[in-house]
């Protein structure tokens, strides 16, 4: 007989879970494994609310295995380490991102690209090596193999640093891989949400000129005066789009709804690169003529490997890059999810797990 | 008074032109400019028929102006050079591809990427710097600025070299630019036509393992035994496609018809690149999930600059890479176009201009009457 979530492991854990595709979250008792030789046990302090959490609780991608405890932008404090663990000690501030395991032997794993491992184990909604379900950071503690734990730099605040663990690496990795880092070049950031606002900050730190591309004129003031973007383009205004055609070296497209690629491709210069990071539930339309006539490319990217995630955290600490957040209590989560569905947040909710997740 | 096409320039020229979007070609008298100080004039010996020629005579893209003399895979023998021409002399064997002019000062031009210049002048159907229309290689002579000429090495026969001037550079350039030229890599080639068959040969010469992906099972024998491909995938066969998932570093997609990208993206390894060199008219569906999950990309590539075109020709000469052609006389042209619509050619028609394109006196008289 299969054990209940509360019984399958020795350590009692409390969190919030969704139990069906209504996506509504509620208190959930479960358990976590004993801290093994390679493991680190972490008391969770903060957890960012990623749009993927919303997609997952609502089963938008058809892959959710209920009950699901989301959360993969986790910051906490080490309470225990296994005997093989040398990088961390009790009391260290650490982070856990999108993955907690992989095969360790394939080409991707060998190249520090665990995120592309075919056997990757996600922080939630996956199955661990022992075949039990993984549960995420909307919970009071988590046990993670030390390889997948990130050291949180001293000057990076835990609350506003938490979203970097997914949003941060998700924009940093493709900017490095696709070569979008040459100072003086022009980066367009489409969509000003959790991913987009961090892309603006990281772009500026790379010395790029940054234009925010958005459907909401109301975001212009923030984009320029608070986030540091150089200019703002309303993508529903044909005259603005036309004037900006062929002016951008790179575009980071963070929009997850189905949207038109043609105008964005038109904004690119020759050899321009558009990286799409959102996950719409239908294919997008890709016009081929402009790709061929301008040798342009459209690429994808999926968060990043552990080594690069650490590099990104250190980079953000050095450049004082943190997320703009709205700190919420655990029991606000369902309201937060509703507001997130309407993009009503500047620009990431972060759950104050340490102070508000009470049984 | 607007000059007739026969009178606007001092050198008489004869070719075949389409007069309207029926695409039917027929004899056409016109003229070419005097050999300027930087120009090379050559007698055309062969001209390849590119699928673009077919699109243009039928005005498929709405860009055509008539009369239209197509042809941008042109080879011949130099008959005159201008006083400032450094690189060529009378008697040299030369070629011209898709372009005959560019601004020469923008970033693209200074990077040897004239094909991406915003002021690019196409070999036919465009306006030259003197405002006259450009006419292509389905004609007896060409007058072209030295910069846009390439030398054809002695060991490359002219007829089988001609298609390299478009099909060759169009497939060579992305193999290099996107790094799909490293020995041991595995590259797929979609579509086995004018572009596809040359792509297979270039990739093999670069030491790459090649799989041809085609809708036609009957092309398998040719692909493997004649062109040297390592394997062959029938794209409509689910089992074959499934077995090849995640095996390719890159894919060169030469297909211009509408076709699904999802199965091709699936064939790529993680970090793989799908490069489009065909020109489907309408947008294709891009499935985003697999692009992200495997960090894959879809890119386009459109020909190459003059420096790279010469490099490609020299590479072809060094590795004995030539196109597989069907040589035709000029008066077979309209039939060839009809067969090209049905992809009924292995794998490029090449017009034997030198031996079969002659202005007959009676036709010249008729043309003169029409235009005066």
Image (cartoon, rainbow, N blue to C red):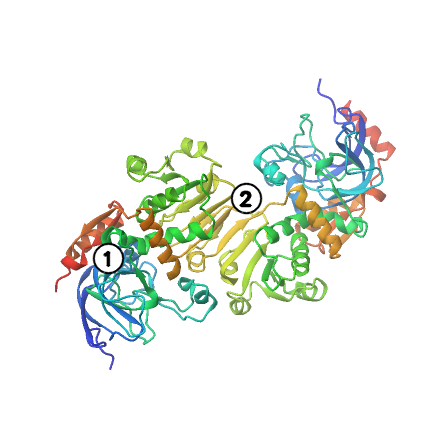
Image quarter where the C terminus of chain B lies is top right
**Separation (CA) of disc 1 from disc 2:** 44 Å
x, y (%) of residue A161? 27, 52
Q: Going 66% across and 64% down the picture, which residue do you hit?
A: B229
Residue behind mark 1: A47
Judging from the image, mark 2 belongs to the subunit labelled: A
Q: Is residue A340 above or below residue B367?
A: below
Q: Are marks 1 and 2 on the same chain?
A: yes
- Residue in front for this viewpoint, A205 or B247: A205
Q: Callout 1: residue from which chain?
A: A
Q: Element at badge 1?
A: strand
Helix, strand or loop at label 2? It is helix
On the image, the x and y values in percent for residue B248 come to: 55, 62
Residue A241, given in percent of the width and then of the height, sits at: 42, 35
Q: Residues within 10 Å of mark 2 (few under 14, many from 20)?
A: many
Q: Quadrant of residue A25?
A: bottom left
Q: Residue at x 44, y 55 (%)?
A: B287
User: Closer to the N terminus: mark 1 or mark 2?
Assistant: 1
All told, the count of numbered labels is 2
Q: Which residue is mark 2?
A: A289
Quadrant showing the N terminus of chain B? top right
Outermost left residue = A359
Q: Badge 1, how many Cα within 10 Å: few under 14, some, many 20+?
A: many
Q: Nearer the viewer, mark 1 or mark 2?
A: 1
Q: Is residue B316 left or right of residue A196?
A: right
Q: Identify the disc placed on residue A251.
A: none
> Is B301 or A154 nearer to us in this picture?
A154
Judge left or right: residue B133 versus residue B117: right
- Specify the quadrant of the image occupied by residue A137: bottom left
Q: Point out residue B142 in the picture as x, y percentages from the top left corner.
A: 77, 35
């Amino acid at each position: 007989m299969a054990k209940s979530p509360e019984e399958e492991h020795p350590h009692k854990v409390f969190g919030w879970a969704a139990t069906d595709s209504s996506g509504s979250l509620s208190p959930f008792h479960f358990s976590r494994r004993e801290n093994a030789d390679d493991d680190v046990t972490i008391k969770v302090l903060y957890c960012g609310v990623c749009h993927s959490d919303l997609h997952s609780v609502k089963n938008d991608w058809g892959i959710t295995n209920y009950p699901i405890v989301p959360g993969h932008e986790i910051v906490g404090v080490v309470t225990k380490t296994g005997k093989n663990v040398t990088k961390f000690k009790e009391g260290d501030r650490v982070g856990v991102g999108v993955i907690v395991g992989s095969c360790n032997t394939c080409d991707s794993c060998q190249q520090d690209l665990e995120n592309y491992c075919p056997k990757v184990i996600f922080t939630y909604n996956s199955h661990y090596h022992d075949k039990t379900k993984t549960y995420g950071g909307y919970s009071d503690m988590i046990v993670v193999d030390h390889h997948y734990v990130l050291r949180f730099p001293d000057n990076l605040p835990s609350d506003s640093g938490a979203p970097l663990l997914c949003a941060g690496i998700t924009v940093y990795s493709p900017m490095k891989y696709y070569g979008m880092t040459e100072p003086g070049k022009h980066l367009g950031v489409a969509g000003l949400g959790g991913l987009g606002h961090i892309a603006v900050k990281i772009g500026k730190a790379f010395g790029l000129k940054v234009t925010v591309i958005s459907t909401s004129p109301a975001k212009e003031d923030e984009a320029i005066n608070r986030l540091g973007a150089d200019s703002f383009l309303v993508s529903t205004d044909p005259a603005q789009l036309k004037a900006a055609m062929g002016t951008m070296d790179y575009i980071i497209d963070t929009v997850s709804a189905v949207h038109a690629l043609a105008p964005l491709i038109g904004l690119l210069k020759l050899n321009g690169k558009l990286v799409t990071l959102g996950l719409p539930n239908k294919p997008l339309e890709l016009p081929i003529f402009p790709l061929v006539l301008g040798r342009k490319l459209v690429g994808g990217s999926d968060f990043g490997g552990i080594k690069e995630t650490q590099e990104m955290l250190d980079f953000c600490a050095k450049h004082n890059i943190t997320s703009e957040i709205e700190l919420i209590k655990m029991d606000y989560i369902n309201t937060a999810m509703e507001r997130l569905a309407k993009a009503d947040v500047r620009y990431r909710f972060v759950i104050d797990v340490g102070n508000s997740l009470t049984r | 008074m607007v000059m007739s096409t026969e009178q606007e320039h001092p050198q008489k020229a004869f070719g075949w032109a389409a007069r309207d979007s029926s695409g039917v070609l027929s004899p056409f008298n016109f003229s070419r400019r005097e050999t300027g100080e930087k120009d090379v004039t050559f007698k055309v010996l062969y001209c390849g028929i590119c699928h673009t020629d077919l699109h243009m005579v039928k005005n498929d893209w709405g860009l055509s102006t008539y009369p239209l003399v197509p042809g941008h895979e042109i080879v011949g023998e130099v008959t005159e050079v201008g006083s400032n021409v450094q690189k060529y002399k009378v008697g040299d064997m030369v070629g011209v591809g898709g372009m005959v002019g560019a601004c020469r000062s923008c970033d693209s031009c200074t990077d040897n990427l004239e094909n991406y210049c915003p002021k690019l002048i196409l070999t036919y159907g465009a306006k030259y710097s003197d405002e006259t229309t450009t006419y292509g290689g389905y004609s007896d002579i060409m007058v072209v600025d030295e910069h846009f000429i390439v030398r054809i090495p002695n060991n490359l026969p002219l007829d089988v070299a001609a298609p390299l001037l478009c099909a060759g550079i169009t497939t060579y350039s992305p193999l290099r630019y996107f790094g799909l030229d490293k020995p041991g890599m595995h590259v797929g080639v979609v579509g086995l036509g004018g572009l596809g068959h040359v792509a297979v040969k270039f990739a093999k010469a670069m030491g790459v393992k090649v799989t041809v992906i085609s809708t036609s099972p009957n092309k398998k024998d040719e692909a493997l035994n004649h062109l040297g491909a390592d394997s062959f995938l029938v794209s409509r066969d689910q089992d074959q496609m499934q077995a090849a998932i995640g095996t390719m570093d890159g894919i060169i997609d030469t297909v211009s018809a509408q076709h699904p990208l999802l199965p091709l993206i699936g064939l790529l390894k993680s970090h793989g690149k799908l490069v489009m060199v065909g020109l489907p008219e309408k947008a294709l569906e891009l499935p985003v999930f697999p692009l992200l999950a495997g960090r894959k990309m879809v890119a386009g590539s459109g020909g190459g600059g003059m420096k790279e075109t010469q490099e490609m020709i020299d590479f072809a000469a060094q590795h004995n890479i030539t196109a597989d052609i069907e040589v035709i006389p000029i008066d077979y042209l309209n039939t060839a176009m009809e067969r090209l619509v049905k992809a009924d050619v292995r794998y490029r028609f090449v017009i034997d201009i030198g031996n079969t394109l002659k202005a007959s006196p009676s036709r010249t008289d008729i043309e003169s009457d029409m235009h005066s």
